[in-house]
Image: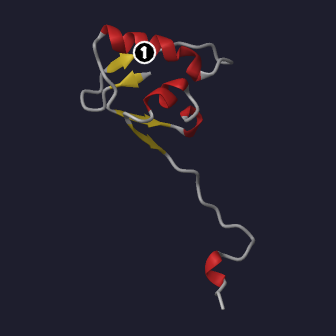
Amino acid sequence: MLHDLDSRLIVAVGLTPTNAPEDSVTDAKETDLAAQKSMLKELHIDRVSLASPLVQRYAKDVATFCKAWPVRPVPHFPTSAFQLD
């Protein structure tokens, strides 16, 4: 689903079965956008969508926002524990 963040209107939709990847409806979403003569300005996506053809196609022209991977403490020494001699 693509929606306008300012107006909160849904501008493009793609329906998939539960076992189908979301990117399988990329063409349907682009058809909806083209029919409305709408253009993407920003993509706000989750990490699973990073490999989507839609994201790849618009990567150079559209600002993409994605939640970063969580940083978890690891049982190793941090970089700051070391000094160069």
Residue 78 vertical placement versus 43 (above, below): below
Along the line of sight, the residue nearer the viewer: 77 or 62? 62
Q: Quadrant of residue 72?
A: bottom right
Q: Tell me if 21 is positioned left or right of 4 in this view.
A: right
Residue 57 vertical placement versus 11 (above, below): below
Q: Tell me if 63 is positioned left or right of 28 in this view.
A: left
Q: Quadrant of residue 73?
A: bottom right
Residue extending farthest bottom: 85
Along the line of sight, the residue nearer the viewer: 62 or 47? 62
Label tally: 1
Q: Residue at x 31, y 22 (%)?
A: 39
Q: Residue at x 60, y 60 (%)?
A: 71
Residue extending farthest right: 75
What amino acid type is highlighted by mark number 1? Glu
Q: Quadrant of the C terminus?
A: bottom right
Q: Position of residue 15 (x, y in %)?
A: 53, 12
Please, which colouring scheme is shown? secondary structure
Q: Position of residue 33 (x, y in %)?
A: 35, 15
Q: Tell me if 59 is positioned left or right of 69 in this view.
A: left
Along the line of sight, the residue nearer the viewer: 85 or 39? 85
Q: Tell me if 64 is positioned left or right of 83 in this view.
A: left
SS at circle 1: helix
Query: Which residue was labeled with disc 1?
Result: 30
Residue 47 vertical placement versus 53 (above, below): below
Residue 64 vertical placement versus 34 (above, below): below
Q: Residue at x 34, y 27 (%)?
A: 40
Q: Quadrant of the N terminus?
A: top left
Q: Position of residue 76 (x, y in %)?
A: 74, 73
Q: Position of residue 64 (x, y in %)?
A: 42, 39
Q: Quadrant of residue 80?
A: bottom right
